[in-house]
Image (cartoon, rainbow, N blue to C red):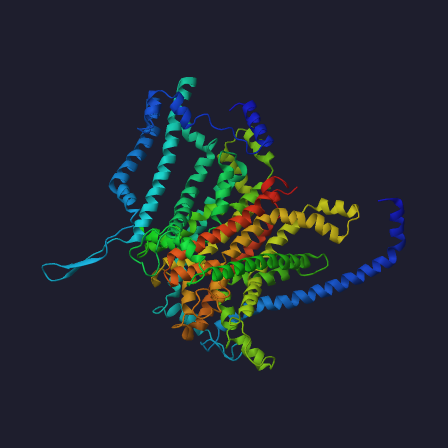
Amino acid sequence: MSLSSTIGRLRGRSASPDDVAPSPYTVRAAFRDGDAATRLSAVVLGLGNLARGQVVKGLAFLAVEIGFVVFIVRTGVANIAMIPSLGWRTQTKHMNEQGYWLYDQGDNSVIVLLYGVATLFIIAAFVWFWTVAVRSAYKAQKLKERDGAAPTLVDDLRAFTDLKAHDLLLGLPVAGVLGFTILPTLFMMSMAFTSYDSDHVQLFDWVGLENFTSIFGLSGEVNAGLFGQVLAWTLVWAFFATFLNFFFGTFLAMAINRKTIRGKGFWRALFSLSMAVPQFVSLLVMRTMLQQEGIVNRVLSALGWIDQPLPFFTDPTWARVTVIVINLWVGIPFTIMQVTGILQNIPAEQYEAARIDGANWWQTFVRITMPYMLFVLTPYLITTFTANVNNFNVIYLLSGGDPTPVGASAGSTDLLVTWLYKLTVDRGDYNIGAVIGIFTFVVLAVVSLITYRSSGSYKNEGGFR
Amino acid sequence: MSKATAAVRAANGGGFLHDQRKRRIAGDAAIYAILTILGVIWVLPVVWVVFESFNKNTTPYQDTFFPTEYTVDNYVQLFTQTDVLDFPRMFMNTLIIAVFVCVISVFFVLSVAFCMSRLRFRMRKAFMNIALVLGMFPSIMSVIAVYFILKALGLTEGSVVIFALILVYAAGSGAGFYVMKGYMDTIPMSLDEAAYLDGCTRLQVFTKIIIPICKPMIVYQALTSFLTPWLDFVMARSIARTQDNYTVALGLYTMLQQQYINDWYARFAAGAVCVSIPIAILFIIMQRFYQESMSGSVKG
């Protein structure tokens, strides 16, 4: 690599970070300018590469195509064909000659749906792979025309350590995310459009948007009123859980950080001690302690401070305040840890300059400390907010959503996610659960994309570099 | 600042300083008081768990806050009476899972963070936005679906469940690159540029420059991933359905179920202490590295 091209590349990068020139080797160009071998590569993958002497690469493309075709013919077509009906055969039994009952399994709509979604997924992946192969054939052709020879296998492999390093490094992680995050999510989302509930365990059908309208109906186990109540509480909870944690955590971190306070290490250790106990353990312990007959109520009444047990998890307002307060207990140590590091990181020159300019404590805090922390912590705050909307553990282990009015499917402290969990796991109403999951996502997406896109650390990645 | 104001300051110096000192002492006292009260609140439940683990009376809902009689039987029973709930086995399961998850996650997170922070390629912003969007889907939603997928792959029976749990904890970890990327963003680009001028490839920049600088953050990442299997119980609960492949979180949760709680409450506390000690040690290590890492990559 020549020096000037390196410098040119670097200069181009620093001028506008994301301005990567579009590749000249597109599928469209391949069809327009490609020769016979390149165009035929669209049908027989790797042909173009083989024609330019890239044997291993060409064979690899071909092998993937053959594998894909075999898969489609053997199971893929059947999987796709089942999607519209989601199966129809019920379980049957018949007696054989020896007089034993034999069961014929019949279709299981969940499995049919999963295989269908997975097959569509694989087809999408292959389409992407196809574009890669066609572009590769076209590129091999062009490079051969220009340089007399297409890149060899060694050249290609070497490119993976340098110009295409991102392909090498992203490969496995992306595959993992595709298989274990995106596929399950799509699969679950597709359930929102089916009748998969406790009455249709084995066989269910597509019902379109029926579940969405039923949520906004006025009656039923899941209705507009209940949904509104749970949604409102979820947002209130996430707001308080995130910002109270942030403010009290920052306050404590700054208090410990105060110049004249001694034993900084001791105080920090004291607050971090609670992090050592696994969260679910401390939550379960707190839950037992705060029961009607729990130790807190017993001690308080033994002291004569209360006549009757405090309704920690039996009164809606008490329960809501309790979970927020206990969440502070869980969360503040983490905030202290995080904020302490950032406080120490703020460039000392800035404080020095502010002091020379005669800024007082408050001005320093507002003009230097806060902007810096917000720059570093905005992504953190958004993730915390998201995590709190999805904070299954604290609610499920602490209050379990209680108090729950008789006959209602959600309690006063139920978040959308715990409600979803109860509906799916406890009741088997997967379709309604999936609808709630989709709404949770919509709420989060709207809130966080707006905040994130307007934050400094997104617009200006190198702001403090 | 003008000379005049400086002179006024100097003239008022004495009284003002006196006042400030008083205020400082009052502030210190208030802060010490607040820290002490809050410190007690934070430590009390932890201390209680430790005391409870030595409680001779194994039932929940007792009359006194701290136990009245103490014994080490709870620990002995926890590790010897393995016929009902096999705690040592759960401990080993979790340890194995944790080690693998730790190695895989660190590798994934480092790779993705490096690509997103230091390299520029097409679709980069798209990748970052997708990762952000994925984080907004309630993870509970995919828990149930993941079980169906593992079942279709034949990973829900017998000892392969351990493998399934490793897969589940580690596979999606690449999407959690944001913190690491934020850290890498604070490393000056000039370091990379100098290396490229010297003829380094991107992979060399990654392994020889970025990884060594990121050491504190790697320790943080390694410990958080190591802790995931110890702390998670929702995923484990939906995937590990027989007691052979329970993780400790699941085991401890089971001890508090209706049919066990009366005999197992003290042993639950003992188990919690056994899990907490390694975690506490890891946290002490982690905190040092974490604060180092939060205070920036390259110090000026």
Disc tally is 0
Seen at 10% across and 61% down, the residue is A98
Q: Is residue B97 visible to the viewer in this orientation of the structure? A: no
Q: Position of residue B141 (x, y in %)?
A: 42, 54
Q: Position of residue A454 (x, y in %)?
A: 60, 44
Above or below, A113 against A27 in this view is below
* Residue nearest the viewer, comparing A157 with A38: A38
Left or right relative to A337: residue B62: left
Q: Position of residue B30 (x, y in %)?
A: 72, 65
Residue at the far front in the pictured view:
A218
Q: Quadrant of the N terminus of chain B?
A: top right
* Residue nearest the viewer, comparing B192 with A40: A40
* Residue nearest the viewer, comparing B10 with A374: A374
Left or right relative to B11: residue B218: left
Q: Quadrant of the C terminus of chain B?
A: top right
Seen at 51% across and 42% down, the residue is B128
* Residue nearest the viewer, comparing B274 with A238: A238
Q: Position of residue A312 (x, y in %)?
A: 54, 71
Q: Is residue A33 visible to the viewer in this orientation of the structure? A: yes
Seen at 36% across and 32% down, the residue is A130
